[in-house]
Image (cartoon, rainbow, N blue to C red):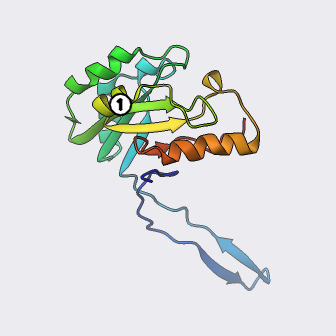
């Protein structure tokens, strides 16, 4: 259905190795930390979301400095205290899609608002303005139900062809 629970491309350069230490007569696990090269991050927020502290330009510069090739800026949709108004999403079309040598995508982290996978953003706005669409459950916008109800909410959001990514499905609150 075009969604990913983890959206990071990585290159592993080190692997876990086991060696036998004869002086201790036991197996010792030597873990060489996996060196990962992140290619993109598609779930980020700027000051427009109300709980982040950088501008689009600052975020793009930081992403380029860290070697990313693609940055997705996905502001919170209505329902999260302090987030931007819908006019913000209409105006995203004028922001350049490349800064500091990296590609940029603009979208929203849309709230799942009911057990049927309903979303806090109108379909027309989603389709017309967003490069990338993330959906997730956020407590200010959702009445926590049973395991079956919460699972249904996620499954219905996953089945929605407008949604690309599901955000933090492991949030146990």
Q: Nearer the viewer, residue 5 or 15?
A: 5
Which class describes the residues within 10 Å of circle 1: few (<14), some (14-19), or many (20+)? Answer: some
Query: Which image quadrant: the N terminus?
Result: bottom left
Q: Mark 1 — residue?
A: 59
- Which quadrant of the view contains residue 172? top right
Point out the residue furthest to the front here.
116
Residue at the image position 61 percent from the left and 29 percent from the top: 138
Question: Residue 163: where, in percent of width, then height?
Answer: 43, 42
Numbered disc 1: secondary structure: helix
The mark total stands at: 1
Query: Which image quadrant: the C terminus?
Result: top right
Question: Residue 31: where, in percent of width, then height?
Answer: 61, 67
- Image position of 41 (left or right of 65): right
Q: Nearer the viewer, residue 79 or 100?
A: 79
- Which quadrant of the view contains residue 162? top left
Residue at the image position 49 percent from the left and 17 percent from the top: 50
Q: Nearer the viewer, residue 90 or 103?
A: 90
Residue at the image position 58 percent from the left and 41 percent from the top: 168
Residue at the image position 73 percent from the left and 45 percent from the top: 148
């Amino acid at each position: 259905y075009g969604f990913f629970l983890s959206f990071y491309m990585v290159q592993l350069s080190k692997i876990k190795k086991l060696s036998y230490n004869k002086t201790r007569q036991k197996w010792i696990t030597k873990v060489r930390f996996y060196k990962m090269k992140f290619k993109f991050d598609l779930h980020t927020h700027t000051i427009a979301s109300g709980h982040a502290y950088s501008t689009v330009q600052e975020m793009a510069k930081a992403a380029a400095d860290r070697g990313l090739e693609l940055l997705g800026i996905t502001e919170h949709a209505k329902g999260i205290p302090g987030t931007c108004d819908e006019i913000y999403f209409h105006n995203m079309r004028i922001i350049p899609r490349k800064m500091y040598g990296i590609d940029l995508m603009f979208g929203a982290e849309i709230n799942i608002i009911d057990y049927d996978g309903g979303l806090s953003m109108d379909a027309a706005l989603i389709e017309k303005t967003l490069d990338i669409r993330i959906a997730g459950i956020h407590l200010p916008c959702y009445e926590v139900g049973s395991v079956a109800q919460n699972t249904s909410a996620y499954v219905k959001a996953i089945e929605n062809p407008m949604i690309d990514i599901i955000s933090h499905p492991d949030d146990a609150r």
